[in-house]
Image (cartoon, rainbow, N blue to C red):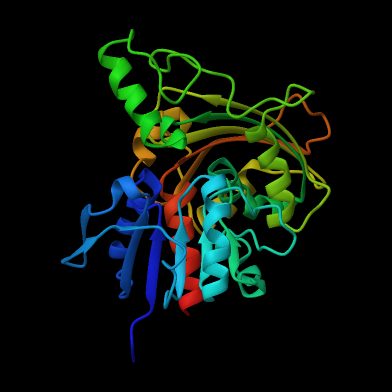
Amino acid sequence: MSKETIAIVGATGAVGQQMLQCLEERKIDCNLKLLASARSKGKVFTFMDQDITVEELTENSFENVDYALGATENDITKTWMPWAQKAGTIVVDNSSAYRLDPNVPLVIPEINPEDIQKNQGIIANPNCATIIALVALHALHQEFKIKRMIVSTYQAVSGAGVKGIQDLENQVKDPSIPSQAFPYPIAYNLIPQIGDFDENGISKEEWKLQNESRKILHDPDILVNCTCVRVPIMRSHSESITIECEKEVDAQKARELLAHAPGVKLVDDPQNKIYPMPLDTSDQDLVYVGRIREDLSDPSKHSMILFCCGDQIRKGAATNAVQILEELLK
């Protein structure tokens, strides 16, 4: 039986490189093709003890490619996606270009794997903050039925790609070095803006959590009040989340549910200073959840608070895409 041919588009970026590592870690035996811009052509990376040379992304790149993992910006994705579609390649795309397209499944494998089979050649990977939040919340949504989320995110510089990581590394050494990825210095600072603001003062990143959650959970009525903040953390996003539910909530029941939820690690012993933190969650694939408590400001007892952390490059992007690919390969 011949091996499937899998391409990584945007193979030299932070997410593309993590996709390469995840394919190897998960022992996905395939013919691998690495595609990137002309300036990256000729770079060599190792996969399964083989040296693979990066090829320039062109209109003919998808000939005989079965599956592609996309890790490029929206405008670039929209350029090459028709080439992949014409060649019959099934794409798992990490950009936001097709996430809200009604004909494109938006998938977190722990939550809605059945949607993968509805694909018409494209499956969208959700936003990183959406993935981390919903992996943490899905079991609670099934039990208590979430109506509304109030979310503050603390998002790592890796979400802005290689340049974001470089900004933090450079500015920790010398705060006077100007930013490449951010409007202000990020070392020793917080920036309460990720994406452009609309006329209501809500950023693009903040809208994603509501719009994507509704699609993934098949619940068009969920409401989200979100503030997204860029923080000087290398690669793990953190989120403080208050949920308002249809049913009365119970913190101990929530802990029991989360202890067995797929993709989750319960880290919740605050009396012993045990709770999720970015350092602990970096370079692994679970979403850590802790600081679980009932909302004492809500006399109806329908609200609960939690704190979660997850690796933005892995579960927030590359790993989730590779997990979707694994479902396709089944």
User: In the image, what residue occupies the spot 66% across and 41% down?
Assistant: 209
Q: Give percent across and percent down for residue 103.
A: 72, 64
Q: Is residue 25 above or below residue 74?
A: below
> Is residue 310 left or right of 167 when viewed as pictured?
right
Q: Which image quarter holds the N terminus?
A: bottom left
Q: Is residue 167 visible?
A: yes
Give x and y (percent) for residue 56: 35, 56
233 or 39, which is in the foreground? 39
Q: Relative to residue 112, is residue 300 depicted above or below?
A: above
Q: In the figure, residue 203 lies in which quadrant?
A: top right
Residue, x 46% and y 36% (percent of image)? Answer: 159
Comparing 4 with 253, the one in front is: 4
Q: Position of residue 160 (x, y in %)?
A: 46, 33
Residue at the extreme top: 176
Name the residue nearer the viewer: 131 or 2: 2
The image position of residue 289, as x and y in percent, is: 51, 42
Could you tell me which residue is drawn at 48 percent across and 35 percent down? 237
* Residue 234 falls left or right of residue 221: left
- Vertical relation: 62 (above or below) 106: below
